[in-house]
Image: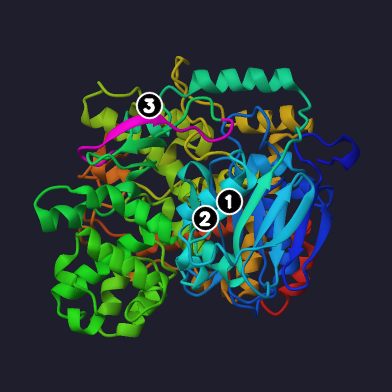
Amino acid sequence: MQNNKQTMFGWVGTIAHVDLTTQTIEKIDTARYCHEYLGGLGIGLRLYWDYARPECDAFHPESPLLLMTGPLAATPAPSASRLLICGKSPCVFPEHFVSANLGGFFAAELKKAGYDGLVLTGRADGPVYLHIHNSVITIRCARHLWGEGNYAVRETLLREHGSRSRMLTIGPAGENRTRIGIVFSDAGSCASMGFGSVMGSKNIKAVVVQGSGRVKVADPEGVKDIRQAYRSMTGQGYFHLFNKPIIVPGSTVQKKVHCHGCPQGCWRSLHRSAGGSEDIRKCQIGNFYMMWDKQLHGDFTEASFAAPTMANDYGVCAMDMVFLLLWLDRCRAQGIVTQQSSGLDLDRMGSREFLDDVLQKTSCREGFGAQLAEGLLRASRSVGGDAIAIAGDMLTESGRAIAYGPKVFSMSAPIYATEPRPFITELHEICEPLTKWARWHLSGGTQTYMSTEVLRRIATEFWGSSEAVDFSTHAGKALTAVRVQNRQYIKESLNLCDFAWPVYDDAGAPEHVGDPALDRKLFTAVTGVAATQQDFDLIAERLFTLYRCILLREGRRGRQDDTLPEFMFIEREEMIADVFGMYNPELYLPGSGEEIISRKGKAVDRDQFKAIMDDYYALRGWDVRTGIPTSATLQRLNLPMVEDACKPVL
């Protein structure tokens, strides 16, 4: 796969490196990277390898923050204009490279302004924001914005630069370098992993972009045909599992809100509370405060609806706040954290006033909030004792919540073991068809067409064998994990929407099996690059192996660190924390033949875990004993720079 700037379609050809310390801007030729790394996560991984210094922490001025679009953004390609943000995250434990992405319109606007991505390094002397008007990048003073919440900042910048401006902003949590600050954007979208705080550490309050260019497409008719095929195939796509948006009781949906280039929308919509407040909501995290609201008041109040808006305004990750509140609640019950020791009115947990107090103190690092600002794992260590064990029962050692985990889905084991912070997209690929199957099974076949036979056909096509969905055996699970990771690393490099891609099942086809090559066909139609499946497989291997080597360079030790939390090996029932458990509380799964098994209360088998990992390393071309990529694999993937840098590990 090769291309050059003169004949480039899809990509616009330039990545901007903005050094905030020297106030200089360097332009990088996208063609240096796109044929081997595609875009999005792929180019982000390679630029991170080139620009990052492993000894620098996430808030060090020289730690790069990368904002990457994909080759399909700002084209008619459906659901393909997300923004990938990556770098060293302050949120995870210990700090290492991760990525996040967000929807809305920013990525498409950045492409129309002439940039495939931004590399941000250094630290400005004072608060600034970047203004990008087509190819012109200006670093402007942001002192009048500093200290403001995300909603007020957006209103100010829209007045200053026009209503068609697209932007990324941070709130006080990012300014004060909490470890859980978000990047906030259009259409209610945001990116977590503490990247808002990394922006704050560079004194960047916002990035505003206005673009008037057009992105060329190699085969417009081909894109149109694929767009039509895509729409006809998604009759039971992931977001149709709920059939309607998830709302706070008493609220109503006013209208759907589409991201750029989305032909049909998802749950993302404008909601109105019973009290008349409005904001955009998407998934179940919009209801994160409901449990405590009802627990305190006996019913749902405006606090439930206001909670995500408040978190967004302060710039605090709502998902991280959920686990901090759960931890506080359990610590309070055991007398570990008290009102006196925390300065928080814990008896009022569930009220709007309590949440505002927690968010304010966390965002500004005031009192006990300074500990909460460190994120759950670090906060629990500052309290000590049983507080650490309570946190450890909720999260992995790196701070990842356990959703769609190995206790239920054995193919998730290598994903959780090798990726300290697995993509939710990887876990969704596993849960989506299996949740549809659960609905089919529990309804006696009246809901969905995802029968056991259809599920096995999809598993064969997408995951390599029908054994992938036989949960009475570990056979086929390593191959499934490799296939899932590879597909999702390609998807994150094309910046495709998780709720739309890939298309596993086809509502109109007799056998209901989707097309695993549809994204590759779309890539070819947009870019004119005739990529084969072998091309995509090789790129996916290169990306994941480069990610592996980045972790090795940052201190990971290979197989000895590819572990699961100890509680996963203990037989006990876990709190339901994902869609599969919500629909299927007994955790039924298909076994061999007509067999149905339940994973409720079951544990990961240590011997099976070892066997799955042995298979996994062999499939990856990594040394089975050490879990380190072999020299032959690195050469095959054209990663010689990685081998030189990792010689002490190799």
Do we see residue 100 in this rendering?
yes
Residue stretch rendered in magenta on the structure: 247-261
- Mark sitting on residue 153: 2
Residue at (48% x, 62% y) in the render: 148
Query: In the image, what residue type sits under mark 3?
Result: Glu
Query: In the image, what residue type sits under mark 2?
Result: Val
Q: Is residue 467 above or below residue 225?
A: below
Q: Position of residue 83 (x, y in %)?
A: 60, 47
Q: Nearer the viewer, residue 327 or 422?
A: 327
Using the numbered discs, state the Cα–Cα distance from disc 3 to disc 1 in whole angstroms.
54 Å
Residue at (83% x, 47% y) in the render: 31
Position of 528 with respect to 118 (left or right) is right
Query: In the image, what residue type sits under mark 1?
Result: Leu
Instruction: Look at the numbered discs 2 and 1 and tell me whether their residues touch, using CB distance below 8 Å.
Output: yes
Residue at (65% x, 27% y) in the render: 76
Secondary structure beneath label 3? helix
Q: Position of residue 634 (x, y in %)?
A: 74, 61
Q: Is residue 179 above or below residue 571?
A: below
Give the residue number, with chain letter if any, for mark 3. 453
| Main SS of residues in magenta | loop
- Mark sitting on residue 157: 1
Q: Position of residue 470 (x, y in %)?
A: 37, 41
